[in-house]
Image (tube, rainbow, N blue to C red):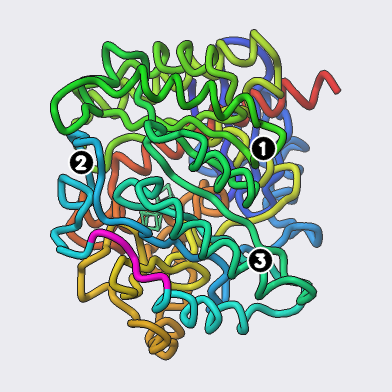
Amino acid sequence: MEQRRFKDIVAFKWNQGAPLAFHARNLEIAEISEDTWNQMSQESLGADDAAVALKNWELENSPDVKSGRLSVGIRSLTINVTQICNLKCTYCAAGGDGTYGSAQTKINVEKTLPQLKFFLERVPTGGRFNITFLGGEPLLYPDGIQEIGNYVRLMTAGQNVQASFSIVTNGTLINEKTLKVLTSLKTNITVSLDGPAETNDKARPSKDGRGSTSLVVEGLKQLSAVRESLGRLTLHGVFNRENLELVKAYEFYKTLNADRYEFTYSVEENDDASNKLFVDQMNQIADMAYKAGGEEELRKVGIFDQYFNALDNQQQTENFCGSGKSFLVMDAKNNLFTCPWEVGNKEEQVGQGTDVDFARMEAEQAPLIEKNNCQSCWARFLCGGGCMFIHKKGTGSKHQKDGQFCFRTRSLIGTTFMYYKLSRATC
Ligand code: SF4
Ligand code: SF4
């Protein structure tokens, strides 16, 4: 794929078909002529009709495009209901064993309910509030999940606030009791699974060293049996140089009857060759998915669906995530942090119980694309400035961009454009 740029217009040319141009501010895609493509290789555009049309398009600011600004107001809370785990994943971000180094292994529900009340009372009428149960392994404490869920349902009943529930689980603890909890809250479920047994068992073994894949597959069967009572079922894999078999993982995922697949490049990985291999495999997956089932199948891959949505709705993103603005994480001691990966880091702690430092959060309100100095990036309104934790891992500063992240993001956005054009052309 070749790429050219004129200010906020970036154009791509693949082996086949007309070049495609993207208007970075308006989130519009259009085919351009060979003449315009050739103009874009010049130092400055010429004066013929194609050049004038391109200049005029670049100057347009669509009235339909929606701003992606976020203001401080917590609409999403991740709760570490446990800080203990039954697996011992090689890349565990929670202190290597799910505990984050803390002796407190599960949340105290009695202390948590007033904290939930505090946040729920601040959701405006007609608003939404999502709770994500995380750990450790959250399904080690199903009673806690049930109590929290019931309380949120009670608090929002008749309040015109839409509450939703999500969980990120290793999928090995699905049984009659946990199924009852998950279905009672119509929970959106993300199951961590890094591919078929030969790879997943190495990355995600149990504490005694045995593989976890067969338990996960059994758990997914049980979830499938009650699908109509659950929210969305996502399979999520983490990939690094030890496991870059994304295509194999995708083929395996397709046998497991999920709604969505997420492929994440490990935050610990910083190898350029692995980064490129990750992108190559994502492109292969896009090709396989599109050939097998067109737009619908492609959009089962979360990242492509996200960009399709943004393009369809002309919805800019100015914050990669709502960290510290619309989203907080509560640890098992009811401390509040800006990001799941920052649990235990005092610098990222913004509260305890109902004592929340909103003044500090207000001070962080500027959009990430500004804070991370992304103004000249053509992908900024689809990316939103990137993940601060990945940036910090790569560069030492959360507002200093990680080059590998930017490469991955721009590459996958470019891939999306090609399939977006193909999909819309056949409508
Ligand atoms: S790709 Fe990189 S430079 Fe572009 S918006 Fe994202 S983080 Fe910023
Ligand atoms: S900074 Fe990154 S890891 Fe943290 S909440 Fe945002 S997207 Fe998630």
| Spatial separation of the CA atoms under disc 3 and disc 2 | 38 Å
Mark 3 vs 2: CB contact within 8 A: no
| Along the viewing direction, whichever of 373 and 423 lies nearer the viewer | 423
Q: Residue furthest front?
A: 176
Circle 3: element type: helix
Is residue 394 within the magenta segment? no
Name the residue that disc number 3 marks: 153
Disc 1 CB within 8 Å of nearest ligand 1 atom: no
| Spatial separation of the CA atoms under disc 2 and disc 1 | 28 Å
Judged by depth in the image, the label closer to the viewer, 3 or 1, is 3
Disc 3 residue crowd, few under 14, some 14–19, many 20+, Cα 10 Å:
some
Find residue 268 and name its label: 2
Circle 1: element type: helix
Q: On the rendered image, what quadrant is the C terminus found in?
A: top right
Disc 2 residue crowd, few under 14, some 14–19, many 20+, Cα 10 Å:
some
| Boundaries of the magenta span | 105-109
x and y, in percent, of residue 332 in the image: 30, 66
x and y, in percent, of residue 408 in the image: 39, 35
